[in-house]
C-alpha cells in the first residue's frame, strides 16, 4: 500500500441512536479484493438509509463495512488483481455496500462510474445512490414511458430532484409533492409541470384535474402511510406505483379493489441487498443512457449543503429535519 495511508479517519456508529452517536474514529485502511477497487474518498453522499442504519433499523449486509455511506467520489488508489476497467489515478464516483464515511473506501469495480462532464467530486458523490435508485424503480420496475405522467412524492429530496429531471429528460410529464412554497418552486424549476404543497392541497384532486381526470401513470413514493391509499386513488388505469421507503410508516388500510379495477401494479425495492451482478448491470445502463445527459448539462445533481466528514452528525440532523432541497454531501 505504498502511496496509501495505513490508517484512515472515519465516522463510526458507536451505538444505535440519534445523529450524536456518529463519532470520529481511526481504523486500518481496507484492502481491495480481487474484483474491487480502493478509492481515496474526496466526498461522500448522505442518504436516508445511512440514518436508518445509524438508528439500528437497517443493518449492513454481512460482507459489508459497518461504517455508513453508500456512495462516494474520489480517486482510485489500488485495484484488485482481476480489475482491468480502472487504473490508479482514475477519478470515479461509486455505489458502495457501506464504508463511505471514511478517507478510503472499497467497492466492486463494476459499481464505479467515471465522473461525468465537468462535475466536481462533491457533485459526483451525489449521483450513485439516487440515480441507481430512480433508474431501477421508475424506469426498470415501473417502466415509465415518454408521454406518460410521473408523480414524485418528496420531490425536493435527493431522490425527488433526480427523478423529476430524469423523467423530464426522457419525455414524461412530471408532478411532485413537497412541503413548502420554496420546495415546490424548486421542483417546478427542475421541470415539474406542477408541484403540490401537501400542507394545503390534496395531490389526488390536483393531479386528477391536471390530467383531465385520467390520473397518474407512475407514482414514486418514499412517504407511505396515508399516501398509500391515496396513490391507489390517483393512479391511472394500468398505473404503476413504486415504493422505496415509508417515512410515514408501512402499515395502513388500502382498498385493493381499486387496484383490481384499475389493473394497477404495486412494486418496490431496496438497493443495498441486491447482487453484485444486478448493480453492475444498472451501472452499465446509466453509463449508456444517463451519463451522456449529465455530461451535456441536461441533468445535474441538486446540491443542498456540504459538511466536513467529522460533522456527519449535523448532516444527519439536517436530513432528518427535512430542511434540505437536494443532496447533502460530506467532504473528506
Image (cartoon, grey):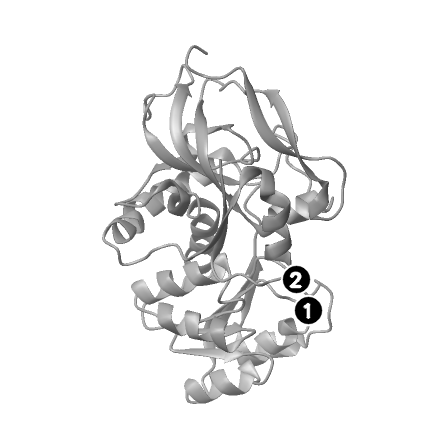
Is residue 7 left or right of 14 when viewed as pictured? left
Q: Which residue is mark 1?
A: 225
Looking at the rendered structure, the secondary structure element under dot 2 is: loop
Q: Are marks 2 and 1 in contact (CB under 8 Å)?
A: yes
Q: Is residue 50 left or right of residue 75?
A: right
Eyeballing the image, is 5 above or below 93?
Answer: above
Q: Quadrant of residue 61?
A: top right
Q: Position of residue 46 (x, y in %)?
A: 54, 47
Q: Which residue is mark 2?
A: 247
Q: Residues within 10 Å of mark 1 (few under 14, many from 20)?
A: some
Classify 202 as above or below 40: below
Residue found at the far left of this picture: 296
Q: Position of residue 309 (x, y in %)?
A: 55, 38
Q: Nearer the viewer, residue 299 or 23?
A: 23
Residue shown at 32% from the left, 24% from the top: 89
What residue sits 47% from the left and 81% below the top? 215
Placement of 10 over or under 269, stated as above or below? above
Give the image location of residue 234, x and y in percent.
54, 80
Identify the disc placed on residue 325: none
Q: Tell me how far mark 2 sits from mark 1, CA to CA.
A: 8 Å
User: What secondary structure is found at the residue carrying circle 1?
Assistant: loop
Nearer to us of marks 2 and 1 is 2
Residue 191 shows up from this direction: no
Q: Earlier in the sequence, mark 2 or mark 1?
A: 1
Nearer to us in this view, 243 or 12: 12
Residue 199 location (% of width, % of height): 60, 80
Q: Is residue 325 visible?
A: yes
Amino acid at each position: 500500500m505504498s502511496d496509501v495511508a495505513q490508517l484512515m479517519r472515519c465516522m463510526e456508529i458507536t451505538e444505535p441512536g440519534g445523529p450524536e452517536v456518529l463519532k470520529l474514529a481511526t481504523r486500518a485502511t481496507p484492502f481491495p479484493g480481487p474484483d474491487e477497487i480502493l478509492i481515496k474518498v474526496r466526498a461522500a453522499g448522505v442518504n436516508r438509509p445511512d440514518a436508518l442504519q445509524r438508528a439500528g433499523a437497517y443493518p449492513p449486509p454481512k460482507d459489508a463495512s459497518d461504517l455508513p455511506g453508500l456512495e462516494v467520489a474520489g480517486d482510485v488508489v489500488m485495484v484488485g488483481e482481476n480489475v482491468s476497467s480502472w487504473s490508479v489515478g482514475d477519478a470515479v464516483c461509486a455505489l458502495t455496500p457501506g464504508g463511505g464515511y471514511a478517507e478510503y473506501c472499497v467497492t466492486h469495480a463494476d459499481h464505479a462510474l467515471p465522473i461525468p462532464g465537468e462535475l466536481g467530486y462533491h457533485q459526483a458523490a451525489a449521483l450513485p445512490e439516487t440515480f441507481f435508485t430512480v433508474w431501477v424503480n421508475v424506469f426498470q420496475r415501473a417502466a415509465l414511458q415518454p408521454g406518460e405522467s410521473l408523480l414524485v412524492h418528496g420531490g425536493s429530496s435527493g431522490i425527488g430532484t433526480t427523478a423529476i429531471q430524469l423523467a423530464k429528460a426522457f419525455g414524461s410529464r412530471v408532478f411532485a409533492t413537497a412541503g413548502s412554497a420554496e420546495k415546490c418552486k424548486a421542483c417546478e424549476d427542475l421541470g415539474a409541470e406542477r408541484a403540490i404543497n401537501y400542507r394545503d392541497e390534496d395531490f389526488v384532486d390536483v393531479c386528477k384535474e391536471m390530467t383531465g381526470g385520467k390520473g397518474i401513470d407512475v407514482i414514486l413514493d418514499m412517504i407511505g402511510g396515508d399516501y398509500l391509499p391515496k396513490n391507489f386513488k390517483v393512479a391511472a388505469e394500468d398505473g404503476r406505483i413504486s415504493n422505496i421507503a415509508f417515512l410515514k410508516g408501512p402499515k395502513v388500510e388500502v382498498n385493493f379493489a381499486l387496484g383490481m379495477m384499475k389493473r394497477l401494479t404495486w412494486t418496490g425495492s431496496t438497493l443495498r441487498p441486491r447482487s453484485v451482478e444486478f448493480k453492475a448491470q444498472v451501472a452499465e445502463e446509466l453509463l449508456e443512457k444517463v451519463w451522456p445527459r449529465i455530461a451535456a448539462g441536461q441533468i445535474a445533481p441538486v446540491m443542498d449543503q456540504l459538511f466536513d466528514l467529522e460533522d456527519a452528525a449535523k448532516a444527519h440532523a439536517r436530513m432528518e429535519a427535512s430542511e434540505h432541497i437536494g443532496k447533502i454531501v460530506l467532504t473528506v
